[in-house]
């Protein structure tokens, strides 16, 4: 063989290897929602509603029962996912920060290795997305109807465009359009399909405005929690269904940004229901008012989830129809959990179970065995590493999570984590939840409200609803010391320094030229 023929053969084999690698590397579809809890996903809890399309991911793949978030609030969770680092290292510790998009992120690393990258829907990190060939994202929080969205990408200047319609449907349509028209069939893709729903204030789409009207949703056992036997922060929040839902939350007033047709449809759905409540409110007991508010709130929340579930079904159907399903890793999660009346609350933020845990479902044909469940402690800290590992891209040493790919394959790494560190920073801030950090091993949980010098310790086996702190109880002295030592170890391991000094936010009140603070209904 001549030298020239040798080199021709060598380059042919090398090109074929690159082509085969590109063909076999999985596409990655990351489906993400805002404030969706396990209690509103029938793969976890079928008592409130059915989510058949999201359940498809669990049925065809794996359900995780202990996916913990590092900081249970929207923006920080998203920053953790982008970077694979805790909030104190990625710089985004609370809503209102601006994400430093110049830092290392998993979409940039995937793009460098030949992936086509896109994000569609809710971004909520303030800065313009970086590392994406294509983005079309909500401006800020984004409304439920008629959203402005920022469109752009590597080769397109960011442009804001106005849309008409229901935001969940618009995000679904844009996702399908990208898959059909913008996707490069010669490259594997990483697509972040991210919904606003079911974020506050839970405005249902036209299709589901009257869904559940004739149904009574079961009340959680802790709806009338009195916050006794815990540290003081549990009593001093502003997120109670009893006191803190506004007329807008309860749909006693219509959204202000609907077009005439949307407003007519909305009023037709809510006018009679509202009139019935308002005519009886003054004669109802306090308990009856709380129960009515709970039903109104939770039904609107579930209506929003129903539209999300429909949208997920449409995208999964497209992958199947186009032959993309077999080589696509699909992961579903939310930015954290949420309270559907547990402890009498709405919202998130706490290290208590309902907000600490986020749903996590994954399917990957040929890799993940259908219908499996994992009880290992995993986290949104692991998502970036998982995407990179699945794509065959080296995981940077400075990322703080672990790849879930071995778990997908049915393996349990010998050194997998047995405890988890959590840290919430946003005080003063929305809902007045005190800053706290803590550790859990899934059987016990230690929480430190460090600005107040208060502690809680929960026995999750005997007290799964976390109603009675046993901190200081002699029977738990050994466990308490053990958990404190583990907390110190994890804070050192994750390089947690002192709490960053921040200027308090201005109190929400009357602004010049604006309206005052909304009152609860």
Image: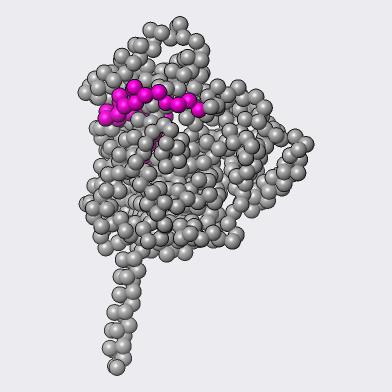
Query: Measured from the top left, where is residue 108 in percent x and y?
Result: 41, 56
* Residue at image location 48% in from the left, 38% down from the top: 337
Q: Quadrant of residue 513?
A: top left
Please tell me which residue is depicted at 58% across the width and 33% down the height of the picture.
465
Q: Position of residue 86 (x, y in %)?
A: 55, 48
Residue, x 23% and y 55% (percent of image)? 322
Q: Residue furthest right?
A: 474
Q: Is residue 211 magenta?
A: yes
Q: Quadrant of the C terminus?
A: top left
Toward the viewer: 62 or 440? 62
> Residue 317: x and y, percent?
27, 48
Is residue 232 visible to us here?
yes
Question: In this picture, is 251 found above or below 149?
Answer: above
**Residue 517 coordinates in the image, percent (x, y):** 46, 19
Direction from residue 302 to residue 497 in the image, left or right:
right
Quadrant in the rendering for residue 2: bottom left
**Magenta span:** 195-220
Q: Is residue 14 magenta?
A: no
Q: Kindly tell me whether residue 199 is visible in this rendering.
A: no
Colour mapping:
one colour
For this view, does 356 lie left or right of residue 491? left
Q: Nearer the viewer, residue 438 or 495?
A: 438
Which secondary structure class fits the magenta region best?
loop
Q: Residue at x 34, y 11 (%)?
A: 275
């Amino acid at each position: 063989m001549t030298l020239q023929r040798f080199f021709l053969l060598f380059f042919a084999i090398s090109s074929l290897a690159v082509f085969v690698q590109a063909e076999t590397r999985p596409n990655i579809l990351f489906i993400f929602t805002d404030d969706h809890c396990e209690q509103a996903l029938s793969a976890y809890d079928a008592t409130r509603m059915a989510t058949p399309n999201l359940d498809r991911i669990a049925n065809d793949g794996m359900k995780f029962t202990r996916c913990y978030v590092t900081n249970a609030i929207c923006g920080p969770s998203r920053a953790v996912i982008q970077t694979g680092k805790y909030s104190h290292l990625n710089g985004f510790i609370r809503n209102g920060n601006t994400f430093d998009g110049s830092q290392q992120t998993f979409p940039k690393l995937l793009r460098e290795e030949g992936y086509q990258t896109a994000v569609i829907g809710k971004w909520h990190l303030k800065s313009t997305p970086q590392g994406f060939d294509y983005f079309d994202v909500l401006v800020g929080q984004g409304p439920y109807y008629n959203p402005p969205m920022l469109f752009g990408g590597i080769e397109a200047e960011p442009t804001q465009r106005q849309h008409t319609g229901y935001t969940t449907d618009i995000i679904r349509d844009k996702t399908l359009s990208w898959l059909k028209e913008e996707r490069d069939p010669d490259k594997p893709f990483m697509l972040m399909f991210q919904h606003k729903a079911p974020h506050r204030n839970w405005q249902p789409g036209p299709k589901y405005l009257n869904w559940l009207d004739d149904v009574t949703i079961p009340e959680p056992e802790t709806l009338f929690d009195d916050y006794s036997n815990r540290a003081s922060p549990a009593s001093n929040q502003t997120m109670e269904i009893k006191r803190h839902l506004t007329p807008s939350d309860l749909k006693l007033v219509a959204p202000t940004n609907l077009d005439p047709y949307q407003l007519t449809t909305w009023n037709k759905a809510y006018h009679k229901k509202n009139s019935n409540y308002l005519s009886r409110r003054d004669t109802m007991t306090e308990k009856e008012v709380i129960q009515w508010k709970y039903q109104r709130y939770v039904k609107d929340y579930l209506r929003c989830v129903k539209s999300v579930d429909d949208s997920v079904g449409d995208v999964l159907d497209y992958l199947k129809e186009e032959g993309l399903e077999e080589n696509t890793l699909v992961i579903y999660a939310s930015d954290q959990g949420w309270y559907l009346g547990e402890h009498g609350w709405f919202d998130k933020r706490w290290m208590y179970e309902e907000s600490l845990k986020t749903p996590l479902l994954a399917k990957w044909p040929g890799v993940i065995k259908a219908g499996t469940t994992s009880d290992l402690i995993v986290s949104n800290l692991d998502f970036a590493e998982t995407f990179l590992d699945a794509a065959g891209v080296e995981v940077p040493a400075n990322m703080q999570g672990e790849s879930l790919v071995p778990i997908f394959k049915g393996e349990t790494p010998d050194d997998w984590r047995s405890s988890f560190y959590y840290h919430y920073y946003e005080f003063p801030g929305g809902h007045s939840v005190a800053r706290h950090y803590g550790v859990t091993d899934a059987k016990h949980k230690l929480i430190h409200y460090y600005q107040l010098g208060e502690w809680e310790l929960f026995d999750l086996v005997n007290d799964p609803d976390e109603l009675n702190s046993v901190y200081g109880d002699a029977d738990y002295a050994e466990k308490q010391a053990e958990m404190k030592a583990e907390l110190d170890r994890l804070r050192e391991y994750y390089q947690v320094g002192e709490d960053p000094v921040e200027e308090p936010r201005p109190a929400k009140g009357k602004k010049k030229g604006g309206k005052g603070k909304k009152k609860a209904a």
